[in-house]
Amino acid sequence: MTLDPTDWTTFRQQAHVMLDDMLDYQQHLRQRPTWQPLPSAKHPFFHQAAPQDPQDLSQVHQEFLDYILPYTIGNPHPGFMGWVHGGGTPVGMLAEMLAGGLNVNAGGRHQAPIQLERQLLSWIRQWFEFPPQASGLFVTGTSMANLIGVWVAQRARLGPSLRTQGLAGQTQRTLVAYASAGAHGCIAQALDLSGLGTQALHLIPLNDQFQMDCGALRARIKADRAAGLEPFLVVGTAGSVDVGAVDDLTEVAAICAEEGLWFHVDGAFGALGCLSPQLAPRFRGMQRADSIAFDFHKWGQVPYDAGFILVREDTLQRQTFATPAAYLRRDTRGAAAGSPWPCDYGPDLSRGFRALKTWFTLKVYGTRALGEMMANTCALAQQLGALISAQPRLELLAPIALNIVCFRFRCPDPNTVNAQLLIELHESGLALPSSTTLKGQFALRAAIVNHRTTLQDLEILVAAVHRLGMKLAPEPD
């Protein structure tokens, strides 16, 4: 039984309708609320039993329009400034459709999609000034890329016996790693999943710019060695999750070289700033890393998901993951040629064709325009900071390093009031910042990542925060 349409003409007509609906959605985002909650009346729809009989495609599409499209988190909207989510593009959407039509398993074998991923790797090597022998891999996101970076660093330190004996064969060695206190939580998770445990990650205090204190890092490494521990990894942050801070990567690289430690950079959204001549100097030192993790689906505006891990030494990454199996036989000719394959560089054998939407985005827009867009988001962040500073009832809570602005409404009991203000702001549909906590203070956090965001959107945000704040706490502190 085939699952292809019995009437291709009717199917094509409906496909055109569906495509037009999504293009209309992207074209008219400003006419929609940034976010709105799923009404309780629509909840029963999501508890229906699985259908046994076919349903008309147009009916299913209408259900998508009624129950799903209006109630997503809203990151394509220019008023979305919550978490560090890219806005996507119409070009990326079309490329994702093409990839779905091909239905490629990009885990390996001799095929053009693998060659395309290798072409992208060659471009990425050049951006980060990595050598020709550097390897890389598309993954779901930076959480997975950071995990792979930790796994490769661990394998490089402990040697081949790690894959056969595990950590049980390393009873006399206690590995420890370092990251700033502002590092993303996935770094601790990576230590957990690597078998070392979260206590193996030693968090280093921040300086007044929310960067890792390199003096404290040196002192902690020295103290740990004296205590019989074995340092093996330092994770530098290129764009922290809370405030967008960039560690002094040049100094971190120097410490790693002196101490013989693996230098990994978590550049989830910040690393691609190297494409902007204005921003690149802030990431100086990143090119000295042993591995870099980052996402194309954040600042790069590629549709979710498109993470990447870059490793300086191909052999180390391949030794960490390659697994012989009879059904993965490699040949020099035929469909099983082209070894080594992407599945030799990470844990996934089945992989989607993430490279295609990334390639389309880079080809259609070009790295110059993408770099300018990234610099513009940082300029907008500075403008937002100026708008906040001009309002007596608003205050900045952290320096603006890149494109993240942390602030709050001044009032008695500011933590409680600003938390309530944030919820009401979300429900208004006008704008969607997120929140964080800085030195015990609840902060509204505006992450300007979307290429569609303009000064007008920032003015709407500030006006809404001021209006809601005055409603909740009319008297100043």
Image: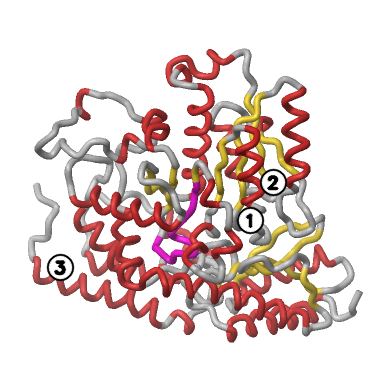
**Of 405 and 22, the residue lying toward us:** 405
Q: Earlier in the sequence, mark 3 or mark 1?
A: 3
- Which secondary structure, mark 1? loop
The residue tagged 2 is 180
Q: Which mark is residue 11?
A: 3
- Segment tinted magenta in the rendering: 292-303
Q: Residue at x 9, y 71 (%)?
A: 9
- Circles 2 and 3: CB atoms closer than 8 Å: no
- Circles 1 and 2: CB atoms closer than 8 Å: yes
For disc 3, the neighbor class at 10 Å (few under 14, some 14 to 19, many from 20) is some
The residue tagged 1 is 240
- Which secondary structure, mark 2? strand
Marks 2 and 3, how far apart in space?
54 Å
Number of marks: 3
Residue 121 image point, x, y percent: 35, 51
Marks 3 and 1, how far apart in space?
46 Å
